[in-house]
Image (tube, rainbow, N blue to C red):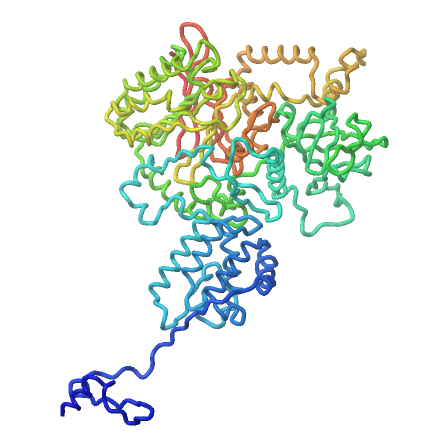
Amino acid sequence: MAMLQKALDDPAAAFSSSPAFGTPVHPLLSTQQARIPAQPAFKPVIHAVIPVRIELRYLRPIAYRTVTKKHNLNLKDTSLQALATFIGKHCGTGWREEGTGERLLDEAAKLWKAESGGVIIEDGKRLQGILRTLESCMVGGKIGAAKSSGAGKLSRESTFSFGSDSAVDLSEATSRRSSLDRHRNSSFGMSKLQVEEEDEHDEASKDPRAWLKVHSAFDQPRYTYDMDKKHFVQVANKPSLFPSPTHKTALFRERYNLIYQRLLRNEAFQAPSFSAARTALQFTDNAATAQQFYKITPIANLLGRGGTSHLLLGMLVIAPTGTLALNDLSGSICLNLQHAQPLQGPDSSYFCPGMIVLVDGVYEEDWNGAGSTGLGNTGGVGGTIGGRFLGFSIGGPPVEKRSVSLGLNNNATEVGGGFGWTDFLGSGSERAVGARMRRLETRLLGPESLEAASEQRRKMVVLSNLALDQPSTLSALRKVLERYAALPETDTPLAFILMGSFCSQPALAGANTGSVEYKDLFNSLAALLSDFPSLLKSNTSWIFVPGDNDPWPAAFSAGASTALPRDALPELFTSRVQRAFMEAGVSREEAGARVVWTSNPSKLSLFGTAHEVLVCRDDISGRLRRNAVRIGQATAKEKTDDQPVMETAADANDDIVMSGALPTPEDIATESQTTDSALTASPSTVSYATAQAKKLILSLLPQSTLSPFPLATRPVHWDYAGALSLYPLPHTIVLADAEAEPFTMTFEGCHVINPGALVEGSGRRKRMRWVEYDSWSKRGVVVEDWV
C-alpha cells in the first residue's frame, strides 16, 4: 500500500512496465484527480513567423515593379536594405510565395507619398516612422488581409483591414487601425488644429478670439512645386540664412513654375477637346471667330521662326548691355516694347524688372547670331537668342481665385482638382478641416450669434507707421484707444494690429536713435497702454509688426530696403509693454499669449483655413514707380504729335529709351508735373487715388509674391521666400504702404487693405486714418479723424 501511495505521489518513481527501456507506468488517478476536467482535444494554431534574411538581389526586382513603376519613386541601397530587413523579420519565409513582401512595399510607398516625401526614398526618420506604423499593423506575418476574397483592389479607406482570425483580438486591431488612420490623416493636415466634433460645443471654444493664430514667416511650412508630380512637395531640408548658392536659382525657377502651372490651369490656355486642326480661325456665315485658346512658346523655340507671332511668358530683366530682355527656363531674348500696350488698358499696372509677364508680338530673326547683341557667342538653349522680339501687348498672368486653387466652388464645397489637400499654412488643409471650420465660424461670428450692438467684437483695428518718436503719433494713438476703451468689455475688438516703423529714423544706425533711445520709445508706449486697463484686461490680441527702420536690420541698412522676411522686434526693447499687461492684472502666461511680436510679413488664421489674412509692412508703391519700365513710347508719339518732330539728343540714344530701361529727363519732368497737377486738383483727387490703388493691385497680385523685384532691389532670404508667396490667394492682404493713400479694394475675391500712415499732414490739426476690418464679412472700412 505504501508503494502504491508513492507511485501516486511520484509517477517517475513508479515501476516500469518495461525495465529494458524504462517506460514509466501510467499513473493511477485518485478520486479527486478524476474530477478535474480533461484538456481540450485541440489547441488554436499560432502561426509563428520565422525571421529570414533577404538578399537585395531577390528583393530589388519586386521593389522596382512596385515602388518605381507603380508609384514613380526611387529607392536607395540603404533604404532598400532597411525594407529587406523589415520584410524578412515580420513576413518570414512567405514574403515571396504569399505576396506579403510586395504588399508591404506598396503600403510603404503609399505612406511615403502621403507624407509628401521626395522622389527618392531615403533611410531616415521618415522611413523609420513609416516602418514603425506598419509594424503595429503586422499580424501573423500579414498586413491588411481583406475580409472578402473578392476584394482585388485596395481603396484608400480600406488600405489596412484585418481578417476574422480567431487568434486576432478585434479590439486591438481596431485600435491599431485608428492609430494608423491618425498617422495618415496628419499627412494631409487633418489633425493640425486638433479639432474634434465635440470641441465645437466646448465652452472654451465659444470665444472667437481663441481661434486666432499668428504664423511667423520663419515657422510656416516650406513647399516647392514639383513639375513632374504636378503637385506641391514639402521641403525636408532645414532652412538657413546662409544657404547654398543653388538656392538662389531655385528661387526664381520656383516662381516661374508656380505661375506657369497656374497659367495652364486657366481656361484661356487650354486647348478645346474638339477643334479644327487645320486653321486657327473658324469661319461662320457672317464673320470669322478668333482662336479660342492661347499657346505659350518657349524662347528657345523662336530660333528659325523669324517673322512669326508668338506669346511668351518670361521674366523682365536688364541685360548686361543695358537693354531690356525677357528670360524663361529655356533662354533669353532682347525685348523691344516701344509699340507695346498693356492688356488691361493704358496705365493699368507697373512693369518692373523681376516681374513675370506675358508678351505677345513678333520675332525678328538676326542672321548675324547672338553675338550681334553684344553679349558674345552665347546662342543655344539657355543662352541669348539672336534677334529681338517686338512686343505689341504686355500684361501680367491672370490671377487665380483661392477657390479654384483649392478646388472649391462658389458655395465653398469640394468640386475636385486644385491643391485642397496641401497644408500651406500649417493649420490644416482645406479638404481636411475646411468645412468644419466654416461651420464653427458661422456659429461664432455669424449674424445669428451676435447682436447689432456687439458687432465690434469681431473687428480688427489696423494701424500703420506708428513713429513713436513723434508726439503727434502718441496723441493719435491715445485718441484711437479712447474710442475703443469706451465700449463694453464684451464688445472690445478682436485684435489690434500695430505696424511700424516704430521710429521715424533708422534705429541703431546713427547717434540720434541708439539702443537706449529706442527702448524709451516702447517705454512711452507701455505708459500709454497703462492708461487703458480695460483694454489690457480684455481678451484682445495685440499684434506688432516691425518696419524697415526697426532693429536689428536697420542697424546696418540705415533705412534702406532690408531683407524679407525679417524677424520680430527683440525682446530687449519690448519687455516693458508686456509688463504693462501684468500690472493691469493679467497673468504672465496670458500676457505672453495676447501680446504677439511677429515677423514681417506674417499670416493670421482665424478658424484655420476659413479665414486667412496676410500682413505686410512695405512701401511697395514707391518701389514700383522707381523701377517701372516705360512702354509704348512710339505709340504715344503717334497719338500726340500730328507733325514730324526733329531728331533730338534723346532720340539719338533710341536703343535704351525704347527698351524702357532709362527714361529721359524731359519725360521725368513731364511725369512729375502731371502727377503734381493730379494731386493738387481737388475734383480728381479721389479718382486718382482709386486709379493708383487699382494699379498697385494689378501689378502685385498676378505675380503671386510680395517682392516681384530683383534681389539687388529688394533682398530676400532664399530659403524663406515661400513666406512671401501669394498662392493660393489669402482672403485678405493688409499691405501697409505709408506712401500710398488708404484704400480698401477687392480683386478676384481677395480683399486688399492699405491703412496708410496713422498721422498725415502738417500744422496744428493733423488727419489720422486707420482701418476697421470686419472678420465676418472680410471687408475693411477706412476711418478718419483729426488730432
Q: Is residue 763 left or right of residue 590?
A: right
Nearest the viewer among 81 and 335 is 81
The image shows a total of numbered marks equal to 0
Q: Residue at x 51, y 23 (%)?
A: 618
User: Visible in this render: residue 744?
Assistant: no
Q: Is residue 299 left or right of residue 407?
A: right
Nearest the viewer among 470 and 722 is 722
Residue 25 coordinates in the image, percent (x, y): 26, 91
Q: Residue at x 33, y 82 (%)?
A: 42
Q: Is residue 545 above or below residue 270?
A: above
Residue 581 coordinates in the image, percent (x, y): 28, 24
Q: Is residue 517 left or right of residue 271?
A: left
Q: Which quarter of the image is occupied by the C terminus? A: top left
Q: Quadrant of residue 291?
A: top right
Residue 343 coordinates in the image, percent (x, y): 66, 30
Q: Is residue 762 above or below residue 181?
A: above
Nearest the viewer among 128 and 391 is 128
Q: Residue furthest right?
A: 367
Q: Which quarter of the image is occupied by the N terminus? A: bottom left
Q: Is residue 243 left or right of residue 208?
A: right
Nearest the viewer among 53 and 94 is 53
Residue 754 coordinates in the image, percent (x, y): 48, 24
Q: Is residue 678 above or below residue 781?
A: above
User: Visible in this render: residue 687?
Assistant: yes
Q: Residue furthest front?
A: 20
Q: Is residue 224 above or below residue 628?
A: below
Q: Residue furthest top?
A: 764
Q: Quadrant of residue 267?
A: top right
